[in-house]
Amino acid sequence: MNTFKKEKKPKKKKEASKFSKSLANIFSGNFLSKDSVVGLLPFIFFLTFIGILYIANGYYAEKVVRDLYKTGNEVKELRSEYITIKSDLNFKSKQSQVAQATERLGIFESTIPPTKIIVDEDQMKKITEEN
């Protein structure tokens, strides 16, 4: 058992050294000089293009959300304006308010009740025949 544990430790050190060498190659840029990387350039460009599209899509979605929020606020403002104007119109169209507004023009409300005009059928026929 003791020997088995000793064998694992050196392997981890070798893997750790491989990992550190790989990181050193990436940070120094040496990995770009290999021929295998040149073959992968189209794929790297494709991934870069997809990344740019992903970022652009995020910005577009944020813009749409801002526009929706702005439009929602505008609809709320217009609705409140509509309700205010509608209530003013209902108030101004009352009979008492109309009479008060027309008094300034010299038009007053009639105090004489309306009379009913009764026309016989004979008179109606005469009137329609004359026209």
Image (spheres, rainbow, N blue to C red):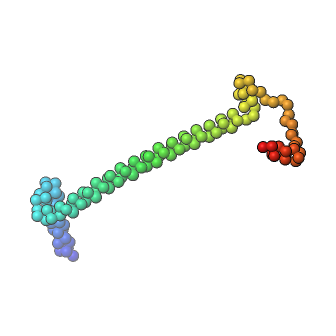
Please identify the quarter of the rendering in which residue 4 is found.
bottom left
As drawn, is 124 to the left or to the right of 42?
A: right
| 61 lies above or below 95 | below
| 46 lies above or below 6 | above
Nearer to us in this view, 123 or 75: 123
Q: Position of residue 5 (x, y in %)?
A: 20, 72
Q: Position of residue 27 (x, y in %)?
A: 16, 54
Residue at the image position 84 percent from the left and 35 percent from the top: 114
| 100 lies above or below 5 | above
Residue at the image position 39 percent from the left and 52 percent from the top: 61
Q: Position of residue 53 (x, y in %)?
A: 30, 55
Residue at the image position 39 percent from the left and 48 percent from the top: 63
- Furthest residue to the bottom? 1
Q: Quadrant of the N terminus?
A: bottom left
Nearer to us in this view, 111 or 8: 111
The answer to whether residue 95 is seen in the rendering is yes
Q: Quadrant of the C terminus?
A: top right
As drawn, is 88 to the left or to the right of 37?
A: right
| 69 lies above or below 7 | above
- Furthest residue to the front? 130
Nearer to us in this view, 54 or 123: 123
Residue at the image position 35 percent from the left and 54 percent from the top: 57
Nearer to us in this view, 73 or 18: 73
Please identify the quarter of the rendering in which residue 119 is found.
top right
